[in-house]
Image (cartoon, rainbow, N blue to C red):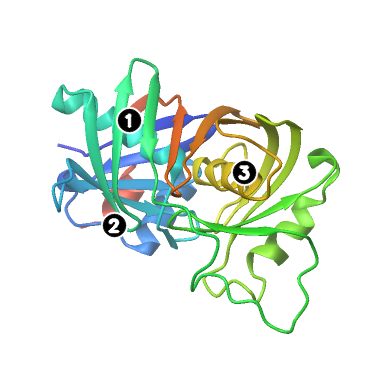
Amino acid sequence: MTPLVERWQGAGNVYLLVDARDLPQPLTAATASALVGECGGDGVLELSAGSGGADVTMRIWNPDGSESEACGNGTRMVARWASERLGQAEVSIATKAGLLPCRVDGDVITAQLAPATLAGPQYQPTAEDFPYVHTFVSVGNPHVVIPVDDVDAFPLATQGPLLEHHAWFPERANVEITTMLDRHRLRMRVWERGVGETPACGSGACAAAVAAVATGVADSPVTVLLPGGELVIDVGDDGTVTMHGPAERIERFELPPAIAALLV
């Protein structure tokens, strides 16, 4: 039987979900990149049996074959995917960023990401200048949040790749450009590490909300308005970050023969 691929979307992010238990062998950087190239999307979520008390394990592949520690929108997709299969509202997902508890309430999925930090090994300022006022935030994966007067006017297409690869980020960085609308709402555009500009980024929305609260320009909860949709982020005083938003399946289809041939 040919393995199935599921295409999901959440707030405009589109990911391909693949159950590794149905594959002849696990994905590699090359096969994951080839799958995105063949089918499109912002990446691949490779799912397998849960570990460490989790209901499912999620491995996150970017289109360039690199891996990410965290994916907020993907976490909600996988939470709903697992909830349907297990018949339970509460599920936990094992990731490189830790164990993420989630709850599915109809079309709204709540996911708790890794605790936010404003420093760490993913952020190494040097004598080299950084060109923008910014806040570094890690929610398992690295983000640089840059407040601007107008997110639409920011040259993200040219600045995004330069900032992603800036020397201050030894593991590269996701880049969020934000504009406050009021103390509970902000607009955001995002350049995702290993992807490029995308309509949404769940972990980026969390990072943007954390940065806004940490710098005193916002109060929790923060609604983040993205080109692909809206996410509501609760930021706790202890660094906990909880995201609320949608996730839905678009379609199921068979693994393309060209990709199946790579997995033999």
- Near-viewer residue (151 or 39): 151
Q: Quadrant of residue 220?
A: top right
Q: Which mark is on residue 213? A: 3
- Disc 1 vs disc 3: which is toward the camera? 3
Q: Is residue 255 left or right of residue 87?
A: right
- Disc 2 vs disc 1: which is toward the camera? 2
Q: Residue at horizontal 32%, vertical 58%?
A: 96
Q: Position of residue 229 (x, y in %)?
A: 59, 26
Residue that numbered label 1 is attached to: 253
Q: Is residue 150 visible?
A: yes
Q: Which mark is on residue 212? A: none
- Near-viewer residue (36 or 199): 199
Q: Do the numbered discs 2 and 1 sit on residues whose CB atoms are within 8 Å? A: no
Amino acid carrying label 1: it is Phe
User: Which of the image's four quarters has the N terminus?
Assistant: top left
Report how far apart the C-alphas of labels 2 and 1 lie in the structure: 17 Å
N-term-proximal mark, 2 vs 1: 2
Q: Position of residue 167 (x, y in %)?
A: 65, 77
Q: Is residue 143 left or right of residue 186?
A: left
Task: Say if 244 sits above or below 32 in the image.
Answer: above
Task: Say if 15 sits above or below 103 in the image.
Answer: below
Tag 1's secondary structure? Answer: strand
User: Which of the image's four quarters has the C terminus?
Assistant: bottom left
Q: Is residue 151 left or right of residue 3?
A: right
Report how far apart the C-alphas of labels 3 and 2 lie in the structure: 38 Å
Q: Residue furthest top?
A: 106
Q: Which mark is on residue 27? A: 2
Q: Residue furthest bottom?
A: 127
Amino acid carrying label 2: it is Leu
